[in-house]
Image: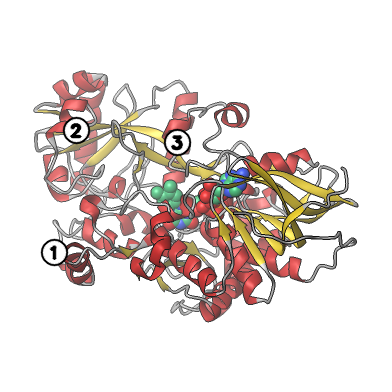
Amino acid sequence: MALVSDWAFETDLAVVGSGAAGLAAALTASIDGLDALVIEKTAHYGGTTALSGGVLWVPGNARMQHPDAANDVQRALSYLEHHVGNRVGPEKLRAFVTEAPRMLDHLLHHSQLDVETFFGFPDYRPHSPGALTEGRSVEPRVVAGRRLGKHLGTLRSRGPIAPAGIVGTMAELRQLASARANPGQLLKAWRLLPRNLWNRAAGRRHLANGAALIARLRLSLLERQVPLWLNASLTELLVENGGVIGLSVDVGGQRRNVRARKGVVLAAGGFERNAEMRREHLPAEPDTSYTSGSEGNTGDAIQAGMAIGAAVDLMDDAWWAPTFMPPGGAPQIVIFERAKPGNIIVDAAGQRFANEADPYNDLVKHMQEAQQAGAAAIPAHMVFDHAYRAKYPIGGMLPGVTPKRHIDSGFVIRADTLDDLARQAGIDADGLTATVARFNAMAAEGRDDDFHRGESAFDRFSGDPAVGPNPCLAPLDKPPFYAMKLYPGDLGTKGGLLTNEFAQVMDTGGAPLPGLYAAGNASASVMGNFYPGAGGTIGPAMTFAYIAARHAAERTPKSTPPAQAQIPQ
Ligand SMILES: Cc1cc2nc3c(=O)[nH]c(=O)nc-3n(C[C@H](O)[C@H](O)[C@H](O)COP(=O)(O)OP(=O)(O)OC[C@H]3O[C@@H](n4cnc5c(N)ncnc54)[C@H](O)[C@@H]3O)c2cc1C
């Protein structure tokens, strides 16, 4: 590559992407005394992170009140070794469990980041060796949007993730979801009331979930005067003497070269929005319309890395989530609703094919397996009765309120009999009737002999505590009946640039590319094909961002090219 001398800007650490990984890398660098720059391709910062639940899976975190907290790093390692196996190198797994609590501590002490435990949320395989029934998942505390000043307007937003615009932590929203059936839950979520009244009455915008996480990181960067350029897209990595020395950025159609004295962190998300890459790497799920990933995530950083010889891994996997597709609206992931009693998920033959309460990543894998085995499970159908509809929110609808527009558009199918429901939904009527009859008999006994729904701590956490003996089972016997189509959506892809335990990007020959780091969904996940628990994508994203920034801080690059620094307009 030709020598570059027309530097438009210089910094220590150049960070590509403004999601959790990117902002955590820049913040760590700044706390540790480096200059940093964040570039963001779109007009809004925050990426998928800002649209997310914002939960972080951090074993051994300082907020843990679990009796085993002191030994949790080792326990978590055995949990990951059990499930990730040799899909990911042992050094990288160890780096994650060791550095994750340090990352969180560091940012809690030196920035506006603040989190609380998502109490009661078990790991996704709660009965595996090393799993915990709560404590590893933490979520950001609610924050007042006005603190961002003019930068509130450029925070990526799809609005609150709960129905009716309710702003609450994930723990509060979960309690609210059972409140109709179990009013005691409302008491636990009392903070929702003043906050939401205040939001409405005074036009205040409190931020929760992923928006709160990004807001807190962005506030911290503003305090430290770390620049974040919007509408600035990575186009090329600049290499000299075998190391990455900077990057080319498209800023409003102008090419600007940014020199990065210590390194470049690629944190530009996955390739979920890139149809061509999906066709190549995820041929079974090529459709970009079912993803909930952010619009800018088109795999640019992965491609830029590959262009200079980087290796990739796990490209055939994603963070899957069953998804509703409301006409004209954004995809809606279906998380806790499936575990509530009074619904089943069936294929076109009317057959169940999985434990409906399974973790979202697993449920989509079951859909895919059923489809590959010859069933018509894509889309599948979530079927429920009046009692379920009256008690629980689903598909952005409050309990008991099913807007006519959703019936008219076919988003929700409603019928007085299972036969008619099946006919309207395109499900085999005899199959559905037989499945419901068998399910109802099992529900009456509180035991799912077919798929063991409600037996694990994970299932029960998402079920309805007011229902017994099994909080995940109730018969579907109160008409009208409902059906909604369920698609194999995703939260983003999990394959990307292969990195080592220092978050350095590896080349295809197995050596680190000096000066180049990756974190978050731009990198191949430390979790391999596994999803460990709530926050299993953002926890590692921020951890490897932190590792990258700290490793880069220690670097002494071989060459120091001349620079002329000026900020692009
Ligand atoms: C509804 C929903 C809920 C979720 N809840 C959780 C949860 O609670 N916990 C959890 O762990 N995970 C959750 N996830 C998944 C999680 O949000 C993502 O896996 C994670 O946020 C990815 O972070 P990231 O920093 O890698 O990428 P992102 O947050 O997507 O950020 C990447 C950024 O890079 C930018 N970019 C792309 N290309 C370029 C370029 N060429 N130049 C400059 N910038 C570029 C993008 O525009 C984007 O802003 C959820 C996802 C969804 C959709």
Say left or right for 158 vs 472: right
| 268 or 132: nearer the viewer | 268
In front of the other: label 3 or label 1? 1
Observer-side mark, 3 or 2, equals 2
Discs 2, 1 touching: Cβ within 8 Å: no
Q: Is residue 124 visible?
A: no
Residue 391 shows in the view:
yes
Q: Residues within 10 Å of mark 2 (few under 14, many from 20)?
A: some
Q: Earlier in the sequence, mark 3 or mark 1?
A: 1
In the picture shown, does residue 424 fall above or below 14? above
Rendered location of residue 116, percent (x, y): 40, 73
Q: Secondary structure at mark 1?
A: loop
Q: Quadrant of the image for the C terminus?
A: bottom right
Q: Looking at the picture, does residue 7 appear above or below residue 388?
A: below
Location of residue 177 (image quadrant): bottom left
Please give left or right for residue 555 compared with residue 540 in the image.
right
> Which amino acid does the dot numbered 2 rest on?
His
Residue 366 is marked as 3
Report, in whole angstroms, how far the alpha carbon at label 2 lies from the one at label 1: 27 Å
Q: Which residue is mark 2?
A: 406
**What amino acid is labelled 1 in the image?**
Pro
